[in-house]
Image (spheres, rainbow, N blue to C red):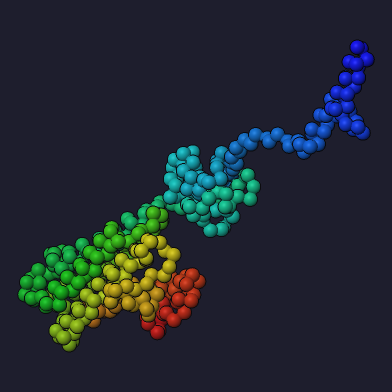
Amino acid sequence: MFKRQKSLASESKNECFPQGAARSTPKNDMRNFLLSAGPLKPTPAVKHSKTTHFEIEILDAQTRKQICIVDKVMQTSTIRDVKQKFHKTYPKWYPSRIGLQLEHGGPFLKDYITIQSVAASSIITLYFTDLGQQVSWTTIFLAEYTGPLLIYLLFYLRIPYIYDMKESSRRPRHPVVHLACFCHCIHYIRYLLETLFVHKVSAGHTPLKNLIKGCAFYWGFTSWIAYYINHPRYTPPSFGNRQVTVSAINFLICEAGNHFINVVLAHPNHTGTNACFPSPNYNPFTWMFFLVSCPNYTYEIGSWISFTVMTQTLPVGIFTLLMSIQMSLWAQKKHKTYLKKFNSYMHRKSAMIPFIL
């Protein structure tokens, strides 16, 4: 009985472990499992979000002395954000008055530049310059254009403090005097309306001295021009009504062209971006884009040349000459910029005067 049980037990062992197979221990079983399953993968480390902050040291551009340190500035912060924090520490310097340079004597950093784009390390040194009293560009344009409009009307009304009333009453005005007042008012009213509703004026600022210079130029020349045209002894143009009529029509055409060009420049394409060069459309006034890169200056000079011929006065001629020189410089500068961006499209164009300049 005992032998029979023993033999059964041995048979059962032989069934579980075939002949020639070694019996494995629990330790060997675990090793075989690990080998068959492959190497163990390390447990992934838990990632913690880490935001890089910068420390900005602001030095005086003249004395090189430290003014303050702006800390905990994030990568996505801009120069404008730094100016805001600087203003909180020194309220007397508002953001538009603060000029920051990456290098001493270098260009001032634009407000939209990010800190990450100028950072070489976690500590950034910027140089501060007080830009003085600042005014917005919209304020400058409105002041420059409102003054001539009102000043010309004062001379047109011939107030007693400017002209002799007896002489003014004895000499009737020539029709060109009324037409010149109408054209002059149309010109500056267009300027004002475009500044408010058409032009995308930059949100930046400019020193107060530029406002003073601009107003002195426009207001001064307007006073000189209006004094001569509205003077009781003013003499009409040499060629009479034909000269006045042709010049007035050309003036109105140039004013209309200037307006339509400014509308196109404010909306270059259907996307509203400046990605492409402004192109002409169905409006014939915009076809000047085929010839020049700055047709708004072309029409502007055309308006003042027409006004000069219509009134035939020396002050208007001098003003037109100075404006032509200034606008030709602006046009050449813009033309060079266009050539860099749109070289294949601009190679046949002139800057302001077709085939000449």
Q: In this view, does 100 lie to the left or right of 233?
A: right
- Where residue 271 sits, quadrant-wise, is bottom left
Outermost residue to the left: 170
Q: In this view, does 204 lie to the left or right of 299?
A: right
Say above or below: 95 vs 89. Answer: below
Q: Residue at x 56, y 58 (%)?
A: 106
User: Total marks drawn?
Assistant: 0
Outermost residue to the top: 1
- Where residue 319 sits, quadrant-wise, is bottom left
Q: Which residue is drawn at 37% across and 82% down?
A: 354
Give the quadrant of the C terminus.
bottom left
* In-front residue for pair 292/282: 282
* In-front residue for pair 150/198: 198
Q: Can residue 313 be seen in this view?
A: no
Give the quadrant of the N terminus.
top right
Q: Residue 304 at what x, y percent from top left?
A: 27, 76
* In-front residue for pair 62/169: 62
Q: Is residue 199 visible?
A: yes
Say above or below: 75 vs 7. Answer: below
Q: Residue 143 at what x, y percent from top left?
A: 29, 58
Q: Residue 141 at what x, y percent from top left?
A: 32, 60
Q: Which residue is drawn at 45% across and 76% down?
A: 345
Outermost residue to the bottom: 239
Q: Residue 5 at what x, y percent from top left?
A: 89, 15
Q: Residue at x 48, y 52 (%)?
A: 112
